[in-house]
Every structure is written in structure tokens, then in C-alpha cells.
Amino acid sequence: MTLFWSIYVGVLVTSNLALAIFLYFYGTRVKIPIEGDGTTGHSWDNGHLRESVRRLPRWWAVMSLTSILVAIGYLVLFPGFGNYKGLLGWTSEKQVSEAREENAARLEELFERYRKYPVDKLSDDATARQYGHRLFQDNCAACHGAQAEGGHGFPALTVNGDDGDYVVATALTGRTGVMPPWGQVLGEEGVKDVANYVLSLSNEPHDAASATAGKPKFEQTCVACHGADGHGNKALGAPNLADQSWIYGKDLATVEQTIRDGRSGHMPAWKDRLGEDQVRLIAAWLRHNALEHRASEDAVPVADTRP
Ligand code: HEC
Ligand code: HEC
């Protein structure tokens, strides 16, 4: 607070208090002139109603004095009088940071126990998963979906979510997936052929002749990142093109667009915001979620082309 505002607040507080103190002394001591009949002489309703005088109730005087004393005591102990900091040195920041430290200390006990286990083990612990689920919803669900099912531009974490160490590493450091644009290299016909070949990998509707023409081009241009059979490469962030999970969509036009113009999905880093302890809890829930998802998928007879 600048000196001006400090003085401004000080003057306001002082004049308020002075007024309260004046009213207290005035109210308890004032003598109101009384007529011979014991009233003030004011009358209404043609003299039927007359105003008499009652002493100020004692409870009012006591309450008034108490609140004045409390106000003065408060202003001595706590900040409130301009820049004066108060004898106790209390600040709202200090209170928040103390509460935060207290909370961190309580969490530390919990984390210390969880740190002993690898993520795969943690995912067997219902409490750890519950914490992880909550953290996921607060921090990741906006992009990856409430059940980690993914969305347009955001991969489903039911695919690689069972790999705890991978999830932790990816989430801590973040990642920008670089799918280069191939329109120039392949030409429009080439893009269409390769797109049809990509769709054939997961048995999506495709033009068989075009896919056959695309195969050698795929092997030449795409396997470096997506692998010989299109199963992807987690280390490069190159998704499996042979599963049923799509980041951007499985219609021909979308796949063509991805190949022609490239993509670069950005996954933010969580190291500083959440830290490893919390990310591990999220990974524990994600692993459990991914395994459950897979079990429910396997129950439905679909061609599973995962390795
Ligand atoms: C702003 C949106 C956004 C948020 C929030 C976000 N992510 Fe991501 N995440 C992405 C994108 C985009 C990718 C794909 C990046 C790429 O292509 O390399 C990704 C990729 C991933 C992958 C790799 C998936 C795979 O199959 O290879 C993991 C694991 C992951 N995110 C975990 C998390 C976790 C855990 C959180 C919460 C702490 C989180 N993400 C929050 C956007 C987000
Ligand atoms: C430099 C490595 C690299 C090369 C080479 C590469 N890709 Fe990709 N590809 C990626 C990455 C990384 C992503 C994920 C991009 C993202 O998340 O935004 C991706 C995404 C895709 C997708 C989107 C998948 C989905 O689920 O929506 C398709 C389709 C694809 N690539 C096809 C190809 C084809 C076809 C080629 C060869 C012409 C190719 N890629 C070459 C790295 C590569």
C-alpha cells in the first residue's frame, strides 16, 4: 500500500472509531429535557400518544463498549490500520502457505508409502487409484476424455495406458508429436494410396487396389516411425496405425489430410505442476483403466491386430 492509501485508511479507521466512542459516551450520559408529566412533550394523534424517555438499556451500553474494545484490540494485533502490520505479524499469505505445508506434510506420509511400489503394483491399490482418478479428472480429462477414451486430436490413453513407466515419463516431460507433411513427397495420388493402405491395416473400409499401390510407399516413407507393420513406436510418439484407436479420425478424408499436411499434437509437461508422486498415481489409475478397457473390448469379438 502506498503512503497515501495507508494514511487514507488510517484516517477512515480513526474517525470511525472516534465516532463510535463519542456515541457510546454521549448515548450513556445524555440528559433529555423532560416535562412535568414525565414525557418529552412530543405528542401525536391529537395528544393520545406521547413520547416518554427510557434509559438506554445496559446491554446496549455493554455491547457497544465491548465492540469498541475488540476493534481496538484487533487493530493492535492484526493488520488493518494502513501499513501497520500488527503485533502478531499475521498475513493471509503466511496462513495459506502454512496450511499448504501442513497439507504437504500429510500427503508426504501417503506418498512415502506409495514411492516404494512401481506403478504396476500401485494400480492394484484401490486408494491409490482413487487419488489418481481424481487427479486425472482435474488435469488430464479435459484433453484425454473422462475415461481416457481420447478425443479429436488427443490420443486415447486406453491404448498405451497400461505401460506405467511410459505414462509417467511422457506426462512428466510432455511431448510434441511430429508427423511430417507428406503431400509434396507423395503427390495427391500417393497420399490417397497410402491412406487406403493405412485403413487396410485395421480392416476399415478401403479401396483394395489403391491400398496395394500404397504399400510400397508406406514401407519407404512411414515405417521409420510407425514400424514395418504400422504398429507404431511409443518412443517417437508415433501411434499404432493398425489398432482401432484413432487420434484424428478414420475416414479416408481425415487420414489423407493427416498424411498430406502432417500433424503436431502437443502434450504439456506436468513435472512442475504435479510432480512425480502425483503423476505416478494418475499412471496407476490409467493402467487399471486401460486393462479394464481391454478386457471389455476382448469380450466383444473384434479383430485384434495388436502385437
Ligand atoms: C492440453 C491437452 C492435454 C492435456 C491437458 C494432457 N494431455 Fe496428454 N497428450 C496430449 C496430446 C495432444 C498428446 C499426443 C502427443 C503426441 O502426439 O506426441 C498426448 C499424449 C499423451 C500420452 C501418450 C499417449 C500414447 O499413446 O503414446 C500420455 C501417456 C499422456 N498424454 C498422458 C497425459 C496425462 C497423464 C495427463 C494429465 C496429467 C495429460 N496427458 C494431459 C494432450 C494433453
Ligand atoms: C517422423 C516420424 C513419422 C513419420 C516418418 C510418419 N509419421 Fe505418421 N505420425 C507420427 C506421429 C508422431 C504422429 C502423431 C501426431 C500427433 O499426435 O499429432 C503420427 C500420426 C499419424 C496418423 C494419425 C493417426 C491417428 O490415430 O489419427 C496417421 C494416419 C499417420 N501418422 C500416417 C503416416 C503415414 C502414412 C506416414 C508415411 C507417409 C507417416 N505417418 C509417417 C510420426 C511419423
Image (cartoon, rainbow, N blue to C red):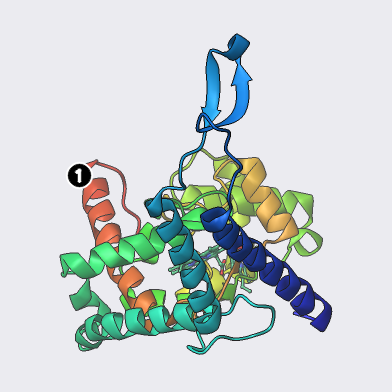
Can you tell me whether the CB of the residue at mark 1 lies under 8 Å from the nearest atom of ligand 1? no
Residue at coordinates 58% horizontally, 14% vertically from top-left? 47
Q: How many marks?
A: 1
Q: Is residue 269 left or right of residue 288?
A: right
**Residue on which the image places disc 1:** 299
Q: Quadrant of the C terminus?
A: bottom left
Work out which residue is located at the far front of the displayed protein and give it. 36
Query: Percent from the top left, x then y, of residue 150?
Result: 47, 53
- Residue 244 in sight here: yes
Task: Farthest residue to the top: give it.
Answer: 46
Q: Quadrant of ligand 2?
A: bottom right
What residue sits 24% from the left and 41% below the top?
Answer: 300
Q: What amino acid is labelled 1 in the image?
A: Ala
Element type at marker 1? helix
Vertical relation: 246 (above or below) 157:
above
Q: Quadrant of residue 106?
A: bottom left
**In this rendering, is residue 16 above or below 117?**
above
Measuring from the top left, give residue 26's x and y in whole percent: 60, 58
Q: Position of residue 269 (x, y in %)?
A: 55, 76
Q: Can I make out residue 149 in this image?
A: no
> In the figure, is residue 72 to the left or right of 137?
right
The x, y position of residue 68, in whole percent, is 51, 67
Residue under the image location 81 percent in, 83 percent down: 3
Q: How many residues crowd around disc 1 within 10 Å: few (fewer than 14), some, or many (20 or more)?
A: few
Between 83 and 12, the residue placed more toward the observer is: 12
Up the image or down, 295 lies above or below 8; here it is: above
Residue 53 left/right relative to 162 = right
- Of residues 9 and 242, which is closer to you in this image? 9
Q: Residue at x 47, y 42 (%)?
A: 204
| 57, 203: nearer the viewer | 57
